[in-house]
Amino acid sequence: MQKDDPLVSIQCLVYNHERFLRQCLDGFVMQQTSFQFEAIVHDDASTDGSAAIIREYAEKYPDIIKPIFETENQYSKHDGSIRKIIVAAMHPNSKYIATCEGDDYWTDPHKLQIQVDFLESHPDYVITSHDFSILDDKENEIKSNGNVHYKDYYFDERFNGYEYCTFDFDDSFGRRFAATLANVYRKEDYINDKVRSLFPHFFDFVLFYFILKKGKCALFRNNMATYRIHNGGMYSGTNTEVWNDRCLNCLYVLYKLENEKRWFPKMNTHFVDLFCYLAKRGRIGDLLKVTFRHVRKVPVSSSLVCFKMIVMKTIKKLPVF
């Protein structure tokens, strides 16, 4: 690695993020580090003014902002083309990857320095993450000002007075311990192209699963970013049916590949949510289709758990006489 080579490559996916993009890019260029870094900003054929904003920042910060402009939307192909394009654009000598999509933003100018310093001094860790806030764009209101990661899943005592706590492979099942806008991890091929091609709608939890097979995650208390909820979001803008169906398909593939039964609780939850969504709308044909698919994909015992969950949900909604 040469002295002027970037140590970190930031991956930033942009699609029609004109309203939010300046805040995102400002979060990159404000980073105060003792090392060089680059931001690969991939505009996926936006139809708004996103590309113009990226060009503006690339001209102003040419050492940081490295733009890619598509003339054809790549995400809609679901063939992994975006990843291949971004990987090819990253500096070959960068050591770490940071991620933040164009509708989210970083709030701490020391974020990259904190996470990279930790990884440099802890070779047994492969990824770092941190706390963040959640902003509801529709209401222009902060819904959660930190404590996002551990308030629902973990007790504060897990930090034991330290600024970070550790999560390993066994902690990853069904828990939200990392988020795209908060991650910095070692640049390795955690998933080969053959396996990756099995996930047409690639989800973060799939990547985290394979990353944690290589080492541990450090989760920092620091609130250093903001996740934005809005109707056009890749995840936050996805409706209940599509979200649960895509998650289920990812989990079916993971279970088949890894024979990892600890995914069943998460799988059951997504199936029950999808089942109830379709039942409420009277879409019996679609309901039967997803039910038969689920029964074929998982053991009988897991299917029985799902149907018990559905019955319990139904009973709770029955009127009391």
Image (cartoon, rainbow, N blue to C red):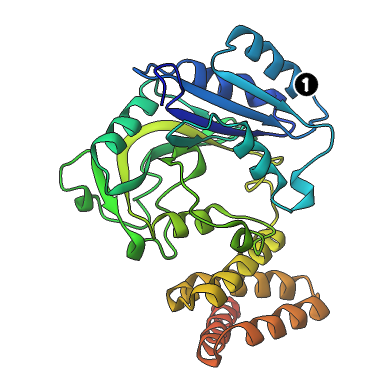
The location of residue 86, given as percent across then percent down, is 63, 37
Q: Given the image, on which type of amino acid does mark 1 rest?
A: Gly
Horizontal placement of 48 versus 23: left or right?
Answer: right
**Image vertical order of residue 196 relative to residue 109, above or below:** below
Where's residue 96, x and y in %? Answer: 43, 36
The spot of residue 261 in percent (x, y) is 45, 78
Residues packed near mark 1 inside 10 Å, few (<14), some (14 to 19) or many (20 plus): some
What residue lies at 68% left-to-right and 46% top-to-bottom?
237
Residue named by callout 1: 49
Q: Between residue 216 and residue 234, name the one nearer to us.
A: 216
Q: Is residue 43 something one can see in this rendering?
A: yes
- From the viewer's perspective, tell me whether residue 162 is left or right of residue 293: left
Helix, strand or loop status at disc 1: loop
Nearest the eye: 310 or 303? 303
Where the N terminus falls, by quadrant?
A: top left
Q: How many marks?
A: 1
Single out the residue that lies furthest toward the top.
60
Residue 245, given in percent of the width and then of the height, sits at 68, 66
Residue drawn at point x = 71 percent, y = 63 percent: 241
Residue 13's quadrant in the figure? Answer: top right
Q: Residue furthest left?
A: 161
In the displayed structure, would residue 39 be above or below residue 221?
above
Image point 64% across, 64% down: which residue?
244
Residue 15 vertical placement versus 78 (above, below): above
